[in-house]
C-alpha cells in the first residue's frame, strides 16, 4: 500500500515536471518569436527610412513603424499565462514607445522647417507670426537638447527597468543582448536626424530674425519720412 502511494506520488511529480518543462519550452519559443518579429519590424523600418526624402515622409514612416510595434505586442499579449514573456513585451514596448513618441513630437514641432509656406517671407515680417514662429523653433531646440540627454541615459534606464522586473538573473543575461541591440539600434538611427533638426532650426531662426529686423527698419524709415 505504502509502496503504491510512493509510486503514485512519483508519477504525479514526473507528470508535473514534464508539464512545467513543456510550458517553459513553449514560452521560450514565444519569446524567441516575439524578439524575431520585433527585430524584423525594425529592419524593415531602417530599409524604408533609407528611402525617405524629407521630414514629412519620416514622420509618416515613424507612425507606421510604431503601429507595427503595437501590432506585434498585441499578437503576443494573448499568451497572458506566460508571465516572463509578458514582462519582456512590456519592457520592449516601454523602451521603444518613449523614443518613437518623442521623435514624432520633435518632427511635429519642426513643421516650420519642412512645411512649404509661399507666404513665409511676408508672414515673418508680421509681429504675431514672427514671435510665434521663433518661439516654436526655440521650443524645438530645447526639446532636442532634452532628447539628447534622454538618449544618453535611455539604455541605462531600460537596463534598470529590466533589473527591477521579475526576470531571473539567467533570464536577464539571455534577454539583454537583444534588447540592447534593438533599442540601441533605433537610438543610433535617429541621432543624425535629431541633430540635423537642431541645426536647421537655428539657421531658420537666425534667417527669420534677419527678415524681421529688415522689415522693422523699413517700416521705421517709411514712418520717419511721412
Image (tube, grey):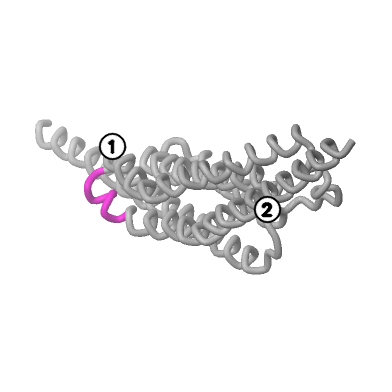
Q: Residue furthest right?
A: 226
Q: Residue at x 57, y 39 (%)?
A: 139
Whether residue 119 appears in this view of the structure is yes
Q: Where is mark 1, residue-wise? A: 164
Q: Residue 31: x percent and y percent? A: 42, 51
Q: Residue at x 75, y 41 (%)?
A: 216
Counting other residues with Cα less than 10 Å from the Cα at mark 2, is it few (<14), some (14-19), or many (20 or more)?
some
Q: Secondary structure at mark 2?
A: helix
Tag 2 residue? 207
The verdict on residue 172 being magenta is yes
Q: Compare residues 53 and 50 and report the one nearer the observer.
A: 53
Give the residue furthest to the left: 2
What residue appears at the point 65 percent right and 41 percent down from the top-left corner? 134
Q: Which residue is most to the front?
A: 225
Specify which label sits upstream in the sequence, 1 or 2: 1
The quadrant of the image that shows the C terminus is top right
What is the CA distance from the residue labelled 1 to the residue labelled 2? 48 Å
Is residue 217 a member of the stretch shown in magenta?
no
Range of residues picked out in magenta: 168-174
Judge from the rendering whether residue 17 lies leftward or rightward of residue 204; answer left or right. left
Q: Which secondary structure, mark 1?
A: loop
Q: Position of residue 208 (x, y in %)?
A: 70, 48
Could you classify mark 1 by the number of other residues whose Cα lies within 10 Å: few (under 14), some (14-19), or many (20 or more)? few
Q: Position of residue 33 (x, y in %)?
A: 47, 56
Between residue 148 and residue 52, name the one nearer to us.
Answer: 148
User: In front here: 198 or 67?
Assistant: 198
* Residue 41 appears in view: no
Tell me what residue is drawn at x 39 percent, y 40 percent: 87
Is 203 on the left or on the right of 21, as rendered?
Answer: right
Which quadrant would the N terminus be assigned to in this image? top left
Q: Position of residue 22 (x, y in %)?
A: 35, 49
Amino acid at each position: 500500500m505504502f509502496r503504491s502511494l510512493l509510486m503514485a506520488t512519483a508519477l504525479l511529480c514526473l507528470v508535473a515536471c514534464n508539464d512545467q518543462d513543456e510550458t517553459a519550452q513553449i514560452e521560450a519559443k514565444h519569446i524567441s518569436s516575439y524578439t524575431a518579429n520585433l527585430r524584423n519590424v525594425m529592419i524593415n523600418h531602417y530599409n524604408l527610412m533609407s528611402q525617405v526624402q524629407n521630414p514629412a515622409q519620416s514622420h509618416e514612416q515613424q507612425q507606421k513603424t510604431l503601429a507595427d510595434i503595437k501590432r506585434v505586442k498585441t499578437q503576443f499579449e494573448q499568451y497572458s499565462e506566460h508571465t516572463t514573456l509578458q514582462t519582456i513585451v512590456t519592457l520592449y514596448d516601454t523602451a521603444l514607445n518613449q523614443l518613437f513618441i518623442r521623435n514624432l513630437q520633435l518632427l511635429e514641432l519642426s513643421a516650420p522647417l519642412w512645411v512649404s509656406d509661399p507666404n513665409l517671407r511676408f508672414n515673418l515680417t508680421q509681429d504675431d507670426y514672427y514671435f510665434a514662429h521663433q518661439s516654436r523653433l526655440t521650443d524645438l531646440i530645447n526639446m532636442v537638447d532634452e532628447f539628447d540627454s534622454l538618449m544618453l541615459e535611455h539604455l541605462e534606464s531600460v537596463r534598470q527597468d529590466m533589473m527591477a522586473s521579475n526576470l531571473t538573473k539567467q533570464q536577464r543575461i539571455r534577454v539583454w543582448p537583444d534588447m540592447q541591440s534593438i533599442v540601441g539600434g533605433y537610438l543610433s538611427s535617429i541621432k543624425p536626424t535629431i541633430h540635423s533638426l537642431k541645426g536647421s532650426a537655428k539657421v531658420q531662426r537666425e534667417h527669420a530674425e534677419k527678415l524681421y529686423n529688415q522689415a522693422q527698419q523699413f517700416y521705421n524709415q517709411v514712418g520717419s519720412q511721412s
